[in-house]
Image: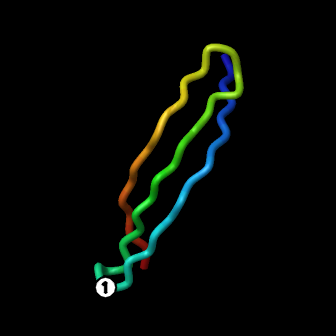
């Protein structure tokens, strides 16, 4: 049971909002019957 994914994404770092990181990624499944989709995330680094 192995699934392999590849993807591409963008990262935006907002300095005024406590170094918030906004990311948008698109992932493609490389194995048979794998899923694909768009992911949006918000994070923070110190």
Q: Position of residue 16 (x, y in %)?
A: 31, 85
Looking at the image, residue 35 lies above or below residue 27: above
Q: Residue furthest bottom?
A: 16
Q: Residue at x 70, y 21 (%)?
A: 31
Left/right placement of residue 27 relative to residue 30 reads left
The way the protein has been coloured in the rendering is: rainbow
**If the image is split into quadrants, where does the C terminus sit?**
bottom left
Left/right placement of residue 30 relative to residue 15 reads right
Looking at the image, residue 32 lies above or below residue 37: above
Res 30 → quadrant = top right
Q: Position of residue 1 (x, y in %)?
A: 66, 16
What count of labels does the image hold?
A: 1
Q: Residue at x 68, y 22 (%)?
A: 2
Q: Position of residue 24 (x, y in %)?
A: 46, 53
Report the residue marked by disc 1.
16
Looking at the image, residue 35 lies above or below residue 38: above
Per the image, label 1 sits on a secondary structure element best described as: loop
Q: Position of residue 15 (x, y in %)?
A: 38, 84
| Badge 1: residue crowd in 10 Å (few <14, some 14–19, many ≥20) | few
Q: Residue at x 46, y 70 (%)?
A: 12
Res 43 → quadrant = bottom left
């Amino acid at each position: 049971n192995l699934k392999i994914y590849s993807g591409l994404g963008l990262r935006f770092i907002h300095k005024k909002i406590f170094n918030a990181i906004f990311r948008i990624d698109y992932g493609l499944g490389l194995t048979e019957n794998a899923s694909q989709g768009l992911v949006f995330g918000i994070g923070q680094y110190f």
